[in-house]
Amino acid sequence: MPQIDLVLAHAVAKNAVFSIEGLDAVLRALDMAITYHEDGEPPQDRNLAWKRTHKALLYRRELFHSTRLRSLSSQNRIQNIISLVRLFRSASACLCLTPTENPQTLIIAGMLT
């Protein structure tokens, strides 16, 4: 069975959290920029440059939002891996597994009970 470096997995998970926090801050700032941009000129005075700028701001917001969703997904997958490894370690410690026993079977059996 391949070895999983839990210290590295925790570091990656921590970096995912930091990325999500940073993306949240960027999204808040971008939302404020969009709000101020919308409030800046009355609708009848909005020219082509204003419309292009507004579309660009909205597009950037969607890019950052999708990146945040991917970061959340990565964080969840990493946490699942860490949980499975912990489950395996606790199951193997309780059952005193020999190297020839199948740990995946034990993990699945433990999840079903």
Image (cartoon, rainbow, N blue to C red):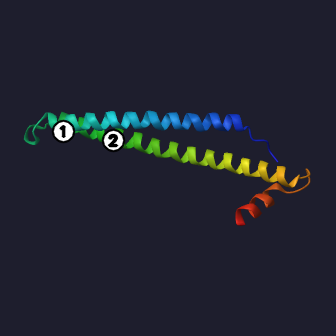
Q: Secondary structure at mark 2?
A: helix
Residue drawn at 27 percent across, 35 percent down: 32
Residue 38 numbered mark, or none: 1
Q: Amino acid at mark 1?
A: Glu
Percent of width and height locating residue 68: 46, 42
Which quadrant would residue 60 be assigned to in this image?
top left
Q: Nearer the viewer, residue 10 or 53?
A: 10
Question: At numbered mark 1, what does the secondary structure look like: helix, strand or loop?
Answer: helix
**Coordinates of residue 111 in the picture (x, y in percent):** 71, 62
In the rendering, at what x and y percent does residue 77 appear? 60, 48
Looking at the image, is 18 positioned above or below residue 98?
above
Residue 48 percent location from the top left of the image: 17, 37
Q: Compared to 105, does 30 lie above or below?
A: above
Side of 15 where 4 appears, left or right: right
Residue drawn at x 92%, y 52% as measured from the top left: 98
Numbered disc in front, either 2 or 1: 1
The residue under the point 80% across, 59% down is 106
In the image: residue 9, left or right of residue 93? left
Residue placed farthest to the left in the image?
44
Looking at marks 2 and 1 on the same chain, the residue that comes earlier in the sequence is marked by: 1
Q: Quadrant of the C terminus?
A: bottom right
Reply above or below: 106 against 40. Answer: below
User: Which residue sits furthest front?
Assistant: 94
Labelled disc at residue 105: none
Residue receiving disc 2:
59
Q: Residue at x 7, y 41 (%)?
A: 44
